[in-house]
Amino acid sequence: MPMELRPLEVGELLDRTFSLYRKHFLVFVGIAAIPELVLLLTQLAMIAVLFGAGSQGSPDAMARLSVFVVLSSGVVALLTYSVAQGATVAAVADLYLERPAGIGKAYADIKGRWLPLLVAMTLVSVVSGFGLVFCIVPGVLLMVAWSVTFPAVVVERMRPVEAMQRSWRLTAGSRPRIFLATLVVVALSYVINAICQLPGIAMAGVSGLMNSASIPVMALVALQVGNAVSACATLPLISILLSLVYYDQRVRKEGFDLQLMLSSLEPREGDPRPRAFS
């Protein structure tokens, strides 16, 4: 049954997030799995390069190679996470407006938006990261204020800085509520990540008990695989939540529910009647 569009409290936002995730689990996990597989293969290749070079390279060369590996992995991670979040936002938008949703369609919807998504991810991450380093509170406030930047990039086709400004205006007055909802999902994600990392941690622990000088390759591989599995399961949750926050703020501030109701009175040929999901 459709759920009435109206301003939502923290508990209702979380309930809709988990409900949507559960009902369309394969779609959301599939969206996250494609870029996550690319990232995992990149990380495994980097591990192979490091261990291969470590057996015959000098310490200085290894240090330079390690820096290159870290920077390269960071760039790939930014790209994959931004693309995965953008595609998830596109899927939520389809479900929100009762359009057909799928993995292929979600990626098709963000075609041509990869660069704006990457730039938006980089700007938000870097600026918020500086805030977290120098003082935790400003960093958290910036992350919350820019939390719906991605929906603005995907749904409204905005440029990165324009989308950040849009997010700042939309979240104003509701940031404590958004922070609480996000905190619950992030905490759950950390728990799931810790569980998925247990095999790798166990391998590393056994190696330490055996007085090994370094973490064995298989432990590093297990850690990366565990992180990939965790990301596939948890990244959609935060993207779904923030997509719902975006629409909720538009309902609160712009009467988006009325806009949908009016648009449903005069549907275009072939278009579904937009409404909220249950």
Image (cartoon, rainbow, N blue to C red):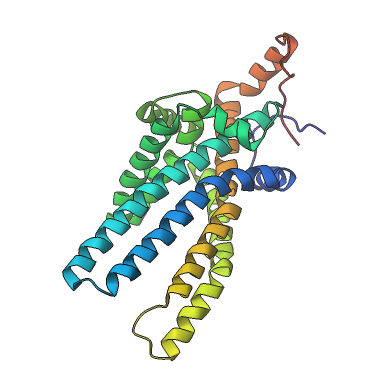
Q: Is residue 164 left or right of residue 61?
A: right
> At 30% across and 53% down in the image, what residue appears?
71
Q: Is residue 12 left or right of residue 85?
A: right
Residue 223 in sight in this render: yes
Q: Quadrant of the N terminus?
A: top right
Q: Is residue 241 left or right of residue 22?
A: left
Q: Quadrant of the C terminus?
A: top right
Residue 44 % position (x, y): 43, 61
Q: Is residue 61 left or right of residue 165?
A: left
Residue 13 in sight in this render: no
> At 68% across and 26% down in the image, what residue appears?
97
> At 48% across and 86% down in the image, what residue appears?
206
Residue 274 % position (x, y): 71, 22
- Above or below residue 212? Residue 265 is above
**From this viewpoint, which residue is outermost toward the bottom?**
210
Residue 39 % position (x, y): 46, 52
- In this view, the residue in front, 151 or 117, is 117
Residue 255 % position (x, y): 61, 21
